[in-house]
Image (cartoon, helix red, strand yellow):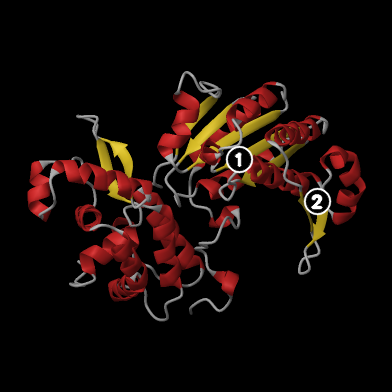
Amino acid sequence: MAASKVDDTPFPVTGYVSPDLFCDREEEVDIITSTLKHGRHLMLYSPRRYGKTGLIHHAFRTLAKVRGSRTVFADIYAARNAHDFNQILLNAVHQALNPTAKLFMKNVMAWFASLRPVVHVDDLTGQPSIALEPGTPKQEAATTREIFRILNEQGRTIFLAIDEFQEINRFKDARLDALLRTELQNSPNVHCIFSGSQRHMLLDLFIDAKAPFYASADQLHLGPIARRTYADFAVRKMKERKRTFPMDDALFCYDLCQGHTYYVQTLYNRLYAEPGPLGRAAVIRVVQAVIRSQDAMMATFRSALTKHQWDLLAAVCREGKVLEPTAGAFIKKYDLATSATLVHALRALMDRELIYISAHDEESGKPIYVPYNPFMALWFKYRRSPQLA
């Protein structure tokens, strides 16, 4: 029988739920927990929607058991300047260190007297949050230092994750990397995960010898979950809920999505909601529905991209993986523009996060280009000729 409750699915797609519904990543969890327990920082990279945020929360469950420790998670993707960063980080610290509203009200003035915070209470949840008045760059730097003072005065080990860390490169009002490096050097009990999804921007912060964070963190690249491991997980979770899911179909879903975690999970989620047997016919029915659901988004992209960008995107999506998108054979196969034109089109598609470099070829060392969104790739392949093999 199909799920009857919103939270009944064994394949959640909106965030980390529980260890029972988390697939594999045992090696990565061991690396994260060992690195932070031994006082080192970690730079964690993955393409968007590969599950790095869920992985951090999963690892934090283990790290939270370290005696006298606290875990702090701050997602700064929405931050556009140092003020936004401070406000997000301060609220993350508050949520981690003040588990009750009563404790928060007890500590707020002692902690934040120099910051002049404004306390808001959510009308729906009753939970307090903190707003800060914007300041000059000098004042914002002082606020960042004050937040780290609060962390240092806890007398605890603090495991701090700053998600989408590459966003600090976009701040025009502050060199936050230099300030944070200094504060961390003076914070022996604060151990960080710097995670991000834009590879070149994140790596620039850690591998450029002139950058403040150069060689200051271990590095971990998050790849796809192993094909058979993910399929085994899906079959097992279906079986636990009295559904029969053939292994071949679980693998078929994985391959259609090129192992991209979010999209594989979404197919499994939608299949679980299907009534009746979960055979190949059900898989194809769900995939075709997913493809049709992309129409409006693809129409938007069609109008936003130039013809050369659209043609190159279509070619990469149909090919799946491309080693040399400006090579003559590839241009001829898909009737594309000249190499010089494609160089600009490729850069534009990567800036829009429609195409990304998934790996480098072992023999040549050349980058391998793939579509960011496997459902988009399926749309290009099957929207007009929907004969799924």
Callout in the foreground (1, 2): 1
> Which residue is more in the foreground, 329 or 260?
329
Residue at (82, 33) in percent of width and height: 154
Dot 1: within a 10 Å radius of its alpha carbon, few (fewer than 14), some, or many (20 or more) residues?
many
Which quarter shows the C terminus? bottom left
Q: What residue did someone put label 1 on?
A: 162
Look at label 1 and name its amino acid: Ile
> Quarter of the image holding residue 274?
bottom left
Label 2: state its secondary structure: loop
> Quarter of the image holding residue 283?
bottom left
296 relative to 326, above or below: below
377 relative to 43, above or below: below
Residue 83 rendering spot, x and y as whole percentages:
67, 43
CB-based contact (under 8 Å), mark 1 and mark 2: no
In the image, taking residue 199 as reference, residue 9 lies left or right, namely right
Label 1: state its secondary structure: strand
Residue at (38, 50) in percent of width and height: 353
Residue 153 rendering spot, x and y as whole percentages:
83, 30
User: Rounded to the nearest whole Å, what is the CA distance between mark 1 and mark 2?
Assistant: 20 Å
In the image, taking residue 313 as reference, residue 45 lies left or right, namely right
Tell which circle, 1 or 2, labels the residue nearer the N-terminal end.
2
In the image, taking residue 130 as reference, residue 272 lies left or right, namely left
Residue 357 rendering spot, x and y as whole percentages:
32, 41
- Disc number at residue 293? none
Dot 2: within a 10 Å radius of its alpha carbon, few (fewer than 14), some, or many (20 or more) residues?
few
Look at label 2 and name its amino acid: Pro
Q: Is residue 326 visible?
A: no
Q: Is residue 159 visible?
A: yes
Q: Residue at the far top: name it.
A: 209
Q: What residue did someone put label 2 on?
A: 99
